[in-house]
Structures are given as structure tokens and as C-alpha cells.
Amino acid sequence: MNTKPLVAIVGRPNVGKSTFFNKISGRRIAIVEDVPGVTRDRIYADVEWINRKFTLIDTGGIDPRSEDVLLSQMRRQAEIAIETADVICFFTDARTGLTPDDEEVAALLRRAHKPVVLAVNKLDHAGLNDNLYEFYALGLGDPVGISSTNMLGLGDLLDEIVKRLPPQSEDEEEANRHVIQLALVGRPNVGKSSLTNRLLGEERTMVSDIPGTTRDAVDTFFTGPDGTEYNVIDTAGIRRKRAIEDESLERYSVLRSISAIRRCDVALLLIDAQDGVTEQDARIAGMIHEEGKAAVVVVNKWDALNKETGTLEKYKKQVIEDLKFMDYAPVLFISALTGQRAQNVLPEVNRVYAQASRRIGTGALNDVLGDAQMSLQPPTIAGRKLKIYYGTQTGVCPPTFSLFINAEELMHFSYQRYLENCIRKAFGFEGTPIRFQLREKKKEDIRP
């Protein structure tokens, strides 16, 4: 039984409904052509946004005035979608402006008495922004300006759709429940199994001082004290490559550990307090960073270290310096064996996972990018200056931002790092890497 809410995309022919559908569904399902009537039937795709799953329905364009048999059938298909939908996303076109057909479709939607989100598509450059305001005349609330082709404003539109979805039923909550995938990784004998048992509150995995006791990645489902559900993946320790060349079983364990990093939501990198950050620890941290995973650095066996005033802060500073490419990751000091500070691990996991899943509105993001460029001018290379036209968030886990610029070769690594720091200062994103996708745009495509 499908418990997901239904969201129907409707509007006149050729306003960009199928382009939006394809972008959101993540694959090219609907055929996109600049010819009215290409999408004839209802097309469905299951999508997810901010932990709500729903089914998106792409429909053929509604042409209220057409006598054509095919267009009449398309209109009927759209009407069926409207009747069955929980939320309707009404697409219009900023380039053509408000038309009499838009007004007739709006009247049809008002008679349906369904929640409606009004999308004004094809706002591809700043010169079209003023066109947004005439759509208030439809009486369907605040219009949301987007560009499906450029993926501009899609997050804001999805936010509005999710706001109008019906409350989750028990069946839907069960289907949408996310279990945080938690991987414990590190060198052999740093206490991964001990921490697993501490988190689970039971002797789930074999614990031994002999490196290599845990040979496979073990998945264990459990519920934390606050009701959050986890699947903890206790992995075999990752040794240096030269140490496992002749040990096929060890090599297999390393592959499983790398696989665990790739399929986790949050990685706990365990470090032995007595050894400090080793070369292999840094290599494992690099794997986590490259895979774009949220991370917490856990310094274990803290009870075994001789300490004096200021030891913790000094040690933490050294960890951050040794792992400076991952300086966004929080550092915890625990003893899995005695339980010292172990109660802080899961709350920190929840926090960094929430940060990795966070979405920022396009307007707020561009305010930060604008202020960043005012504070530090973009670089100039060979007489050409980098221009950042606008940015939009296009993904989570890790948070991913598309920056539309004039030339990719002008974006120096140091300036990209500066922009990352500005975004972190404004929005947080502790515990997660940030990714940028650079997209070149011609000047004439941005300004009229």
C-alpha cells in the first residue's frame, strides 16, 4: 500500500513542468522538448525532501481552450491528477508572463479546494525578477520564483510543497523513519568494539587487546536514549597497506571498512590517546573526507593518559592541526572502557548528522555570498576577474552548493576555501564537509 502523499505538477503546456520533474526525480523520466504536448500521460516518481517522502506526478499541459482530441485527453489526465493529489504545484512561465490560460487553470485549482504552491518558472536571470509580481493576481498566495533549467530556487519550492503536505500517518512515519548509519573506523586496537558495546549497553562484539580480533564489519540496530534509531557498523581496523599485502583476510577486512565509510551517514574516527594522530589515522580521515561523510573524531583511552592542567585543550589543538583538512569535525575525549564521557557520543552524532542534512534558502545563501565578495574581492588572473553571479544549494549529505560563475579557471582554491568559511560562519555545518560545484554562465545569460 502506497502511504506517500501525492503532489501533482500542473500548468499550461511548455512551462517547464517536465524539466522540474526530471531534476527532482534525479533521472530523465519525462521527455523534455520545447514543443507543447510532449508529456501526455501522468508520470510518477517517488522523491524525498527534508525527511518527507512523497510521490511526484508530472502531467500533460492543461489547455483550457483547445478542441483537439489529444489535448482534451491530456487535460483529463491532469484533472485526474488534481483530484487524487494532496498538494498541487501550479507552474507558470515568467518569460511569457501571466496569460488568460493561467487564470483559467487557477480557477480550476480553486474549485478543487486543494493546497496549491504557485511556481513561476524560467526566472533564468535577474532581469526577469520583476515579472514575478504580476502572478500575485492569481490569488494563490506568494509565488515562488525558480529556474528548473538552472536549478535555481528548487529547494525553496520543495520547502513550500512539504509545508502543505498532510500530517504524516503512522504508516508513513514508519516508512519514512530514517535509521542513522553509524560507522566506527580507525586503526586496529583503538577501542572500536569497546565503544560499540558501550553504545549498545551489552557485549555485542568480541573485545580483545589482540589487533585484528574483529575481522568483518558487523551491523547492529539499536535505539538511543532519546529514541533515535541507529545502525552501528563496527569495522575491522584499517592497517597500512604494506602490512596486509600477504594477508588476504586482512585485505578483505580493509575493503569492508572502506565500504562501511561509503554507506554510513556519520563516521566515528577513533584515535588512541596514547599514540596521538598517526599517519594511518590521517589517511582514514582522508577517506571519510573524500567520501563526503559527516564525522566525529573520538580520542579514546583518555583515562590512560597522564594529564595536567590544559592537557585536553592542547591535545585537541594538536588533533585539529594534524587533521587540518577536516577541521570542521568536533573532537571528543572518552574512555570506552570506563564509560568516561561516552554519553556525549550519540548527541554529537545526532548534531553533525542534522548539520549534514541541513538546507539553506537561495536568498539567504546569496546574501552571504554577496557580503563575502564585498569583504574580500574575488581574484583577478591575467586581467580577468572572477564573477560569482549567484549560488544555490543542490544537495545534502554533504551540503553541496552550485556556484554560477563566469570562468571556472578564475576560482582559486584559496578563495573557494574563503567562501566555505563564510558559509560555515553564517550557517554552521559543523561536522560535515561542504562541496562546491562550479558552473560557467555567459554574461548575457545572467543579465538582460
Image (cartoon, rainbow, N blue to C red):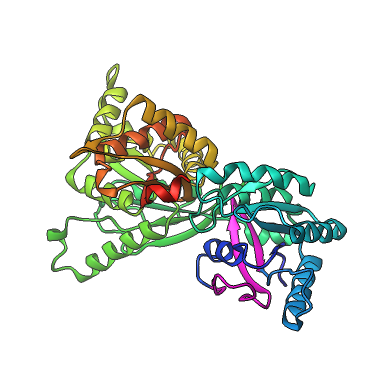
- Does the segment drawn in magenta span residue 32? yes
Q: Is residue 154 left or right of residue 193?
A: right
Residue farthest front in this picture: 448
Q: Residue at x 44, y 38 (%)?
A: 429
Q: Which image quarter is the N terminus in?
A: bottom right
Image quarter for residue 29? bottom right
Q: Is residue 225 visible?
A: no
Q: Nearer the viewer, residue 410 or 443?
A: 443
Q: Residue at x 80, y 47 (%)?
A: 139
Magenta span: 29-57
Residue farthest bottom in this picture: 69
Q: Residue at x 38, y 44 (%)?
A: 434
Vertical position of residue 368 compared to residue 240: above or below: above
Q: How many marks?
A: 0
Q: Residue 375 appears at what percent x and percent y?
A: 36, 24
Residue farthest right in this picture: 111
Q: Residue 330 appears at what percent x and percent y?
A: 38, 35
Q: Nearer the viewer, residue 159 or 369?
A: 369
Q: Is residue 40 left or right of residue 359?
A: right
- Does the segment drawn in magenta span residue 225? no
Q: Residue 4 appears at what percent x and percent y?
A: 70, 64
Vertical position of residue 74 compared to residue 317: above or below: below
Q: Nearer the viewer, residue 177 or 428?
A: 428
